[in-house]
Each structure stands twice: as structure tokens, then as C-alpha cells.
Amino acid sequence: MSQPLSNFQVRDAEALLHPYTDAVALRAHGAQIIERGEGVRVFDQSGRSYIEAMSGLWCAGLGFGNAELVEAARAQLEKLPYYHLFSAKSHETAIELGEKLKAMVPGQMARVFFQSSGSEANDTQIKLAWYMNNALGRPRKKTFISRKKAYHGTTLATASLTGLTGNHTDFDLPMPGIRHLSTPHYWKEAEAGESEDAFVARLAAEFEALIEAEGAETIAAFIAEPVMGAGGAIVPPMGYFPAMSAIAEKHDILTISDEVICGFGRTGEWFGAETVGYRPTSLSMAKQLTAGFVPLSAVAINGEMAEAIEANSGRIGMFGHGFTYGGHPVGCAVALKALEIYERLDMPRVVQARSPRFAGHLKSFEGHPLVGEGRSLGLMGALELAPEGRRTGFAAPGEVGAKMLSELRERGIIARAVVDSIVFCPAMTITEAELDEIFAAVGPSLDATLDWAKAEGHL
Ligand code: PLP
């Protein structure tokens, strides 16, 4: 029997349509209403505390309280609370952040373009590629290549790049002109007896075959997250990105690194592309750019793209794209402060120091009858729930994952279930003791879920 809903839960269900939520179930069970945050923890209205083992939505990399970020926002609100970058206007904070990002990102990036969300950043990537290819006199070079289980956002175009059926069903998506390659998840997708190298070679051959079938002159870009986040924290084999980059380069196809989750230390280097050997021609950044405190996203493009796009804007008379809040002064000020903090702490090194303990905890559950794989890179990872470790998964996908999530919540841990992958992405500043606290709850949660799964006939 579920508890009667609180007044707030009733008001919530009456007032709000929630993203990624079963609205019918919400009316029965109510939302979990979070009131405040402190360190790696959040507190609900009854005062109960939870370790937020997902940094919210992979973004609160410095946790849920930071006086320096608050002060940066306050000072900017007082000095210049709003301005924009349209029609040849600018402001100092955006200029400084643009310079800073150019210096930080891998590759020789020439220009930075601001938005507010990860979806807007990736939507911008599509428009930039199309605009550039029209400018270069190759109007057929428009197709985008993504991967199954990729997550690139939820606008019409970026939900189409996203390779998850839940983002397509009944939205009449994906749009034409988008292709999805296989997911580079060795544990789940490799054929019997296939080595990791052979798996990579097969995925690279799939990419080449698609280019050959459609013609390189029709393909604009390959877009990829270094580690697939919302698809289930899927870590590719380390040979995958060098192989995919080489093919894209050979065929003059742009390589976009979606760093919306992986950027700013999360994988143990400043950017995920550096960790996995991906050579991008442009990057999308958001989330940890401001430590999640205020919305801001950015795209960085290389010199060739910048030159073609800027020249075309001269011919047309403008670059007709932009968002009212792209480069918002408060977002830029908070981002500058977040980057200063990351640099002061040497965040990649902090993540490298913490990640063996994180990885060890995840791996330690691989012998559990409900766990197939414990995987991670840096401080993002997942436990893949599977009946007796079988790669085929459960007959009713997602039910065991949902039960595991509620068991963790009962024990004071907020994680996320992507079907039956239980995903963790704690604040990068989490202590070893706090990591241990998360995983001390995982064992009993798995055991309770196993008992339930047996009783319900999932095994
Ligand atoms: N790209 C990646 C890799 C993401 O994980 C997300 C969101 O989780 C997005 C893009 C979309 O970002 P937003 O929700 O800010 O539009």
C-alpha cells in the first residue's frame, strides 16, 4: 500500500507535467519533493537526507552548496543582471569565458558559441554543420550519424539524434537524415567469442559500410558522447574512438564530442574526448560548466568551421541563429568561478584519485546473482542488473531496475535506473567515506531486490 499523498504532492501533480515521468503513476505515488542541499546530500520535506549519487542530472559536480558560486552569481546580478550577444553586442564575462574555454578544450578550437542547455548546444551543432556545408557549396552533405542508446537532448532534432525509443515514441521521431550505429557496449553487444579488438573492428566496419552505402558527400557529422550517459553509463572499448575518428577524418565528416556530461574532469581528464582518444572537430558543453548552479551551455568549433561560417554570415548579412539567454552574464560568471574551482582543486586528478575506489565497489558486485557487469570510467558508472549475469536481460525490462532504485532510496541513496542499468555519477568532490556509504547501501538493496525478483518470477 502506498502512503497517502502529502499536500505538496497533490499540488505538484495538479500543477506540473514532469519530464521522464509516468504521470498516471505519479498521481498514485507522488513526487519526491526535495527541499534543500548540502555537500553531496539533498534533504526532502520531512528532513530525511539522501546522498545524491547522480549529482542531480549529472551536473552538480561540486555538490549542492558552494558559497563561491553563490557569490559569483550575486555579484554579477548586481553589476549586469542581463545582457546578450545578438547584433554585435557583448559583455566582459562572456568574452572571458570564451577565452577560457578555447584554452581548455582539446584540439585547436577557434570560436565559442553560447546557449542555455545541452539540447540547444547539440541543436546548434546540427545547424552549424548544415550552414557550413551550404556555405562550402556541398548542400547534400547533411546526414548526421549517431548511435543507438546515445543521448543528445530532447528538441525535435536532438531527440532524433538520441538513440532511445522512449524519446521517439508518439513524437513522430526520429526526423529524416539521421542514422544510428550500434552501441559500443562490449559486455552486452559482442558476439560469442568475439575479442574486444574484433568488436571494435566490426563497429568501425559498420560505420564505413554506412558511408559507402550513402556516399560521404551526403554525410555531415558523427556525433558521440565519450561515455554514453543516459544510455546507461556505457564505457566504450578504448580502441573505439580512435577507429571512428580515423574513418570520419578520411571521409571529411565532422566529429562532434558531446561533452555535456563528460566535460570538466568527470572521466579523469578535462574532457571525455581526451580520456577515450576521440579527435573532435567541435564540442558541446553544459551541466558541469556551471556545476549545475545556473543554466549555460557552449559549443566550441575549430578554425575551418569558424572561417566558413563567418564568411557566409558576411555574404548573407548575418548568422541567423541564437538564443535570448545564450551567454547570460550570470551563467558566464558562475561558469568562470566553477572553472576556477576545478583548476584550483585540479579536478581531473581528484577524479583519478577517487575513481579506483568507485570502480572497485562497482566491480565487487559482479559475483552477485543479479549483476551482469559493474562498469565505470572516472566517476561515472553503472551496475547492469541481469538474471544470473545473462546478457539477454530480464523478460520484463525495467521492472527489476525500478525495484532496485526504490530499495536504494529506502536506504538514503538517490541513483538512476536506465531500464536495468543502475547508474551512479556522484559529485566529483565526494569523499571516500561518502563513496563507501553509497555502496554499503548497494549490497542490501541488491539482496532485497533479488528476493523480490524471485518472488515475482523475474528469475
Ligand atoms: N547531451 C548529453 C550527453 C546529455 O546527457 C544531455 C542531458 O542529459 C543533453 C545532451 C541534453 O541536455 P539538456 O537536458 O540540458 O538539454
Image (cartoon, helix red, strand yellow):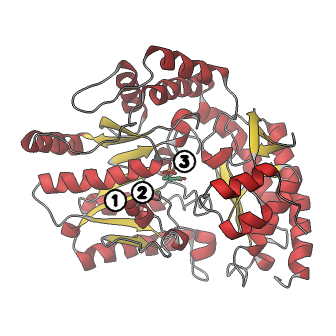
**Disc nearer the start of the sequence (2/3):** 2
Front in this rendered view, residue 253 or 165: 165
Q: Which residue bears the numbered disc 3?
A: 261
Front in this rendered view, residue 109 or 426: 426
Q: Is mark 3 within 8 Å of ligand 1?
A: yes
Tags 2 and 1 touching, CB below 8 Å: yes
The residue that appears at 56% across and 69% down in the rendered structure is 196
Q: Secondary structure at mark 2?
A: helix
Q: Nearer the viewer, mark 2 or mark 3?
A: 3
Measure the alpha-carbon separation of dots 2 and 3: 20 Å
Relative placement, left or right, of 221 versus 380 is left
Q: Which residue bears the numbered disc 2?
A: 242
Give the amino acid type for the residue marked by disc 1 in the picture. Answer: Ala
Front in this rendered view, residue 452 or 385: 452
Front in this rendered view, residue 257 or 135: 135
The residue that appears at 91% across and 67% down in the rendered structure is 448
Q: Which mark is residue 447?
A: none
Relative placement, left or right, of 338 versus 300 is right
Q: Which residue bears the numbered disc 1?
A: 246
- Residue 427: x and y in percent read 68, 39
Crowdedness near tag 3: few (<14), some (14–19) or many (≥20) residues, C-alpha within 10 Å: many
The residue that appears at 52% across and 26% down in the rendered structure is 334
Q: As displayed, is residue 253 above or below residue 262? A: below
The C terminus sits in image quarter: bottom right
The residue that appears at 31% across and 56% down in the rendered structure is 126
Give the amino acid type for the residue marked by disc 3 in the picture. Answer: Ile
